[in-house]
Image (cartoon, grey):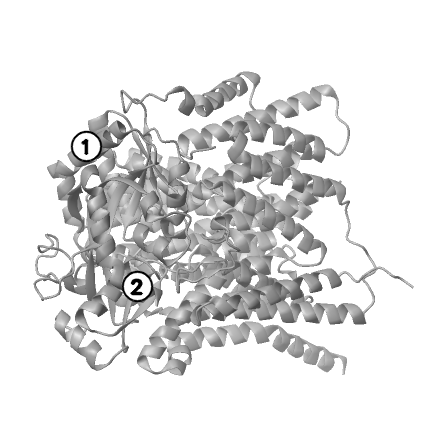
Amino acid sequence: MLEAFLSALTPFNLSLALAGVVLGTIIGALPGLSATMAVAVLVPFTFTMDPASGLIALGAVYTGAIYGGAYAAILVNTPGTPAAIATSLDGFPMAKRGDGDLAVTISCFASAFGGIVGALALLFVAPPLATIALNFGPVEYFWLAVFGLSLIAVLSKGNTIKGLIGGFIGLFLSTVGSAVIGGDVRYTMGQLSLLGGIHIIPALIGLYCIPVLLGMVANRDPHIERAKSGNGTRIPEALGTLWRSKFNLLRSSIIGTVVGILPAAGGAVAGLVAYSEARRTSPDRARFGKGAPDGVVASESANSATVGGGFVPTLVLGIPGTPPDAIILGALLVQGIRVGPQLFTTQSDLVMTFTFGLLIATVLMIPTGLVIGRTAFRAISSIPKSVLAPAIGVLIMVGAFAVEQNPNHVVMMVILGGLAFIAARWGFEPSPIVLGLILGPIAEQGFVQAWLIGGASGDLLGQYFGRPISLGIIFLTLLTLAWPWFSDWKARRRTLEVTE
Amino acid sequence: MLNRRTFGKSLLAGAATLSAPSLLRAQAGWPSRPITYVIPFNPGGESDVTARFQQPFMEEITGQSVVITSRPGAGGATSWAQLNSLEADGYTIMNTIVPHTILQPAMKDVGYQTADINNVFFFHYTPDAVLVRADSPFQTLQDLIDFATDNPGALTMGGSGTNTANHLASVIFGDLTGAKVTYVPFSGSAPAMTAVLGGQIGGGMSYTTQAVRAGDQVRTLAVATEDRVAALPDVPTFRELGFDHVGGAYRGVAVPAGTPAAVQQQLSDVIGQVNANPEFQRQMTEAGYQVVDIPLANVPAFIEERQGAYAPAIERMRG
Amino acid sequence: MNRTLHRDLPPGLVLIGLGSWALWETLTMSVLGAVFPRLAGSGMLVGGVILCIRALWRAPPVQPPEGELTRPLLFLALLLGWAVMLPITGFVLTSVCAALLAMFLSADEKFDAKTAAIQAISLAALVGVAALLFGQILMVNLP
């Protein structure tokens, strides 16, 4: 193990890790550019390196890109990658009131912590953890998605009807196109450009960013408040916040690691589940969604932990845990490394070196993230709106196009953005729509597969309700839905007792 | 902030990028500039991996760089529907797959017809493979067929997607063996394999490459090749077991309609040369792919043969 | 007597229409493929009905939505034109023009020639950098 650690520490590998993190962070920060793309771009360059160095570079870019998504989520309210959706829920309100620097610093430390937990899990308990991926069948994915959707009801308290309607609109949007499962062509109105469905990233940019952009034009107040004081990083304050929410931090990192192991879930689900749990257990739940640092902590530590978690099934079972992992597996194959379960046993030193590389990259993310984050915050809070708005326009145009090099995506983004703007004036928030759009396919696929499997086994009810993990998730869902009323009731009783 | 000079430079560079295609329309000296190789699937998948295997050899032969770009969407249909609107100069080539390009237009309106795809070469196929988890009671393919015949529909087999190569293979499998299995579609090969390994489904209608990757976690019961697969020497072929099924996902390279015939032939020759390289063959075989040579001249006959082979199964899938 | 429409009435009617259409379309779908579209369609339909009923019962909200509407709608039209023209006139040309228009549209106060020039140049430079970054480094084939 020591040997592997040392070989990860060679100057070449260290500089690779640093360059990878910097590149990844920048790519992740640009809307539309996901971790998948960052990794895919880098793959050809790694063919000239030895496998361990190549892997370290890829892992570092991946780590950086997942973290970079936080900037756009916090400073522009545009989760450039789905993984950062939950970050924007509280990150942008923080930035709006002048705590953007704090939010960026918190997200940096929380990401690093989550990343380290994920990497440590990969290092020490990967083989047993991989069995989690295997125990998660279609039904479990279905219930996990339902759990995520239950967040809609929680998030839109006070305006529950519109929140739920938003969720249904999102579900509806998610069914557009030719269904991977079942093969139906739905709601395309004969348009070939809709056959591929509504791609999640242009939709995210459209639904979140365009209303912000239009709001920027409509209102005279600055896009986000400038820093109130200090040097623009507020490190002690951020560390204090993290210390106060240490349980949240640890819980979210573990949730992120576990969700990362599930091949069909991903960073968005990890962030949302962690956010939902953080909100449920927090003493001041009411602040969530209005700029609670705890929300940023939960989302960011969870989505960064999925990096390490995702490598668990990738390296132990040969099944990519996340889309970027699929590319890394492909890259290994081209390099002549036999991936799959034998990789973990026969080439354990390679795996070790890689894991240490990932750990080092995560640690390097702290200084990188602080420096880039401070620059980004200063830039966005001080550039005049007449430059900021067109600049964001350029970036979202090129970003939406770059996802699949498809000009139709750009048009779709603008149309959804326009609808989101109108919907916002009618009192509909974008988040429920996005939740429906992202979780809809996971729920639907799980539902249909479970239906087919249950039908084949002749025990449909047992398939949906008879499996222990499913029951656990159902219980958590009910708890999340009922908890606010339960604790309100308890609080009311307590005040009654006090007044008596 | 950038100063004026960098701005000027970048504008110039931008203008150069814009006008490049129209300036260099040469074909006599093909190739005289980099070739863009479009993959209609996500990076990391089989199409991407095999293209990356080809890439260095193609670069060596042509002396030009080959740029792989990925344009996924609707199971490849988005890119294939756009193929003929790309510049027909031999500098944009696209990866194609049979049965996808036969199956998709037959099942629904996807914006292209099988005949619209101008293939110049099919260079390999990823053979179909039937696999089960290592601790499954099915030791042989016959065990599985017997169970599925005695208990119609009770055996679930997972594959990637509906109206896909895996789906087609499961229909063909049922037609050939009389076994009645329930095909469960997943959103890709990886989730389907997870479900096999997790015991969520009875078996997988997958590819040899997945079998190789999963190692001894799975038992492969049969592969759809003529001779045994080098990477899976103990696994019998369907033919050995008495079922006439050879096939899988045949990957080829296509060019936009109107590409000069000479360039098409040159491209076909280049890919043929890559296929003949022992190092390329070794990489492909180790991962479970079967290298085949179907050059430009043989493409029409091949497509016709495949259309005939799939017709009964497609008829049944359209139901 | 306030005779303005309740804010929830238009979205309610839109949702009823959208939901009905979504349900109508499910008639041609396969059994399993129709489950989620039906769920989404009925959700939108029922939601729309609830919004309408509530809107007819209650008084309209007191405060109208804040912010002006003309400039955002113009900006939205600009974005749409930008997206549509992208594959026709190419990334660099379209983006430089659109970014400059967007700059004038989003400026809060009149600016002098010098500021305008500096801002215009930096935006054009941004387009150039984006074209280089995506086109050359990230290997995206920009139109």
Which type of secondary structure does the marked residue at label 1 adopt?
helix
Q: Chain of mark 2?
A: B
* Residue at 44 percent of width and 69 percent of height: C30
Q: Tell me the CA gap for discs 1 and 2.
A: 36 Å
Tell me if residue A227 can be seen: no
Tell me if residue B266 can be seen: yes
* Residue at 70 percent of width and 78 percent of height: A492
Q: Is residue B120 left or right of residue A390?
A: left
Out of C24 and A130, give the one closest to the viewer: C24
Measured as percent of width and height from the top left, residue A446 is found at 41, 68
Q: Tell me which corner region of the image, top left, top right, bottom left or bottom right, holds residue B267.
A: top left
| Amino acid at pointer 2 | Glu
Compared to residue C58, the image places residue A191 above or below, namely above
Front disc: 1 or 2: 2
Q: Quadrant of the C terminus of chain B?
A: bottom left
Compared to residue A212, the image places residue B168 above or below, namely below
- Residue B269: numbered disc: 1
Q: Chain of mark 1?
A: B
* Residue at 38 percent of width and 78 percent of height: A463
| Amino acid at pointer 1 | Asp
Measured as percent of width and height from the top left, residue B274 is found at 17, 35
Q: Which residue is mark 2?
A: B315
Do the residues at discs 1 and 2 belong to one chain?
yes
Give the crowd class for mark 2: few <14, some 14-19, many >=20 residues within 10 Å: few
Compared to residue B108, the image places residue A225 above or below, namely above
